[in-house]
Amino acid sequence: MMRTTVGWHVEMEFMEDDEHTRAVALVRLPDGSEVRAHGQASRHHSDSRQPRVGEEIAGARALNELAMQLLTKAHGEIDAASGRTSHPIHV
């Protein structure tokens, strides 16, 4: 049986104007570190204004970048603990 031993909370913040949506994703890890990532979406001038779509795209891009940063962090920790260069972690 699996038990939850730790939980992460990801915070998302959005900034928008008429053509751009920017997102910032932040996760605070149990070791006290924070990982922050950014994403952006642009609306073509002929598209109708749909703020939620811009948020979804910018948010997904920020979360994707957050995932890549976490993989890089984990990879570095594996290398530091083992004293050798490990195989890359792929998504």
Image (tube, rainbow, N blue to C red):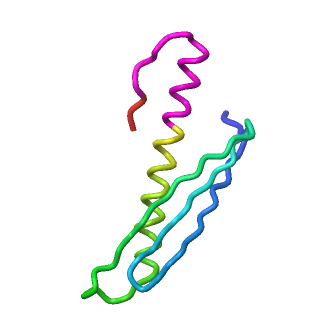
Decide which of 17, 69 is in the foreground and name it.
17
Decide which of 37, 27 is in the foreground and name it.
37
Q: Residue at x 69, y 48 (%)?
A: 28
Q: Residue at x 73, y 36 (%)?
A: 31
Q: Position of residue 7 (x, y in %)?
A: 70, 46
Residue 87 against residue 7 in the figure, above or below? above
Q: Main secondary structure of the magenta part?
A: helix
Q: Residue at x 50, y 41 (%)?
A: 69
Describe residue 83's horizontal placement relative to residue 50 as left or right. Answer: right
Q: Residue at x 53, y 53 (%)?
A: 37
Residue 38 against residue 79 in the figure, above or below? below
Residue 32 against residue 24 in the figure, above or below? above
Residue 75 is a magenta residue: yes
- Farthest residue to the left: give it: 46
Q: Position of residue 76 (x, y in %)?
A: 54, 26
Decide which of 13, 7 is in the foreground and name it.
13
**Range drawn in magenta:** 71-88
Q: Position of residue 38 (x, y in %)?
A: 50, 58
Quarter occupied by the N terminus: top right
Q: Quadrant of residue 42?
A: bottom left
Quarter occupied by the C terminus: top left
Describe residue 36's horizontal placement relative to residue 88 as left or right. Answer: right
Q: Quadrant of residue 29?
A: top right
